[in-house]
Amino acid sequence: MLDIRHLKKTYENTPVLKDISLHVNKGDVTAVIGPSGSGKTTLLRCVNFLTPADSGELTFGGRTYDLSRMSKKDIAAIRMNTGFVFQSFNLFANKTALQNVTEGLIIARHMPKDEANSIATQALERVGLKDRASHYPSQLSGGQQQRVAIARAVATNPQIIYFDEPTSALDPELIGEVLAVMKDLASSGMTMLVVTHEMRFARDVSSRVIFMEDGNIVEENDSRAFFEAPRQERTRRFLRTIDRSAI
Amino acid sequence: MTDRVWGILVDSFPKILLPGLRMTIPLTVIAFALAMVIATVVALIQFAHVKVLTPLARFYIWVIRGTPLLVQLFVVFYGLPNLGVYLDAFPAAVLVFSINEGAYCAETMRGALESVSVGQIEAGYCVGMSYTQIMWRIVLPQALRTAFPPLSNSLISMVKDTSLAANITVMEMFMATQRIVARTYEPLALYLEVALIYLLFSTAMTALQRWGEKKLTVGGALHA
Ligand SMILES: Nc1ncnc2c1ncn2[C@@H]1O[C@H](COP(=O)(O)OP(=O)(O)OP(=O)(O)O)[C@@H](O)[C@H]1O
Ligand SMILES: [Mg+2]
């Protein structure tokens, strides 16, 4: 469903992604973990073209693209079928929760307003925020804002949703509500690529885990195997450094 | 105050107010509306880093902000005829005031555009919106809200600055007052009277600003 081959990205002479290849199957929930600065965010941004990759290939929706030569049209077409959830929510501040969700439907997809409103209401209901539909982002807690952001991504019916540390900007007591929504989404069969520091999510919800360090993928494994019988010595060392109680 | 002075003040009030309503206000409103268009376009050009046009925009702002308004008025009204360009006083004033104000407001608008978080633009792309759609529906509305107080400030300044148009024969409030002073020799009372009328205009605009800000505030917050 998503195939990335030999993705490379350099920022001002510093290689940040060094030949990344990875494959995501339909329905996979893949957790991307690794130390700060390892290139996790850059990977997601390159895959959705928020940051241009230097080279590599992407297969998505049955087509293969050369990442060094993407046309605006191809980028737009791919984005129509992907969702993105940011660490800092990035809700449209001048739009209500409902309008945040309908914007991509009415404006980008030219959906009739009634239909968009009903889909958006369903999406908000799914994240438990139907009663907050007419609130502006500034009137919502961080956890609620992130759930609206997830509803915004889900409503466009994407083939895959990318998450970049969706709970890292949240107060500890708000993390649970967002993780619960993501867990629900995962069990409904949504394909997800999730950069996270939440080891519990990586172990209990995701089906695959990718461990990145220094612009490389160190280990890619089933999540159970990753935590119980990691193949790489580097992975074992990493797992020892994280708080055992967090797993 | 003598009865004579009082009589002159009462007598001249409509004679000053009327040019105010017929010249000062239209000059301000038309020129400011045009200035807003110029400012928005010039700010968007810089915000989007449009090739060739961005340095032109910087050049425009540099020249206009670096030269006195009065000189600009004189160049257009008294200078351009040398090139065969003759403008009536009112259109010349509208032209100069809008170009002048546009340069200042462009900087206000640019700052306001830049205050909208990049993340919202990226989020717009991620839900499939185009750059134009994002600018039009997400960034510009928020920028206008942010820019509204400083732009209102500029508008209030402009009401007063239009008195400079008297220098190129626009028959606005200040010129009307000067004429009456020339006839009656009561400069103190009459210039205070015109000052009071400017103050009335500014006060009305400040009230409008308050109202507008309230209207533009959504969700009880300033969306900076
Ligand atoms: N815009 C940029 N310009 C230059 N260097 C950048 C830029 N963005 C990221 N980098 C560098 O690229 C490397 C990878 O950054 P990235 O944000 O992808 O890491 P990350 O794995 O997401 O880290 P974290 O866990 O802290 O979010 C870092 O060394 C970072 O300093
Ligand atoms: Mg990151």
Image (spheres, coloured by chain):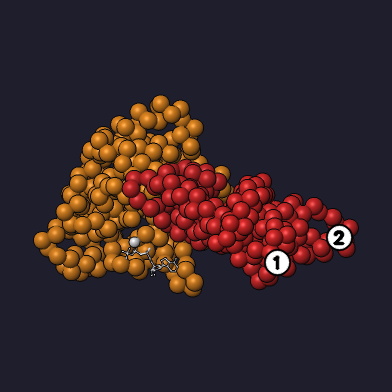
Chain colours: A orange, B red
First reached walking from the N terminus: tag 1 or tag 2: 1
Q: Quadrant of ligand 1?
A: bottom left
Write down the residue under mark 2: B81
Q: Is residue A210 left or right of residue B201?
A: left
Choose between B32 and A192: the one closer to the eye.
B32
Q: Residue at x 76, y 60 (%)?
A: B168
Label of residue B70 in the image: 1
Task: Indicate the secondary structure of the residue bearing disc 2.
Answer: helix
Choose between B33 and B140: the one closer to the eye.
B33
Q: Amino acid at mark 2?
A: Pro
Q: Residue at x 25, y 50 (%)?
A: A141
Residue B215: tell me if it is visible: yes
Q: Is residue B165 left or right of residue B223?
A: right
Q: Is residue B119 left or right of residue A168?
A: right
Q: Quadrant of residue B81?
A: bottom right
Task: Indicate the secondary structure of the residue bearing disc 1.
Answer: helix
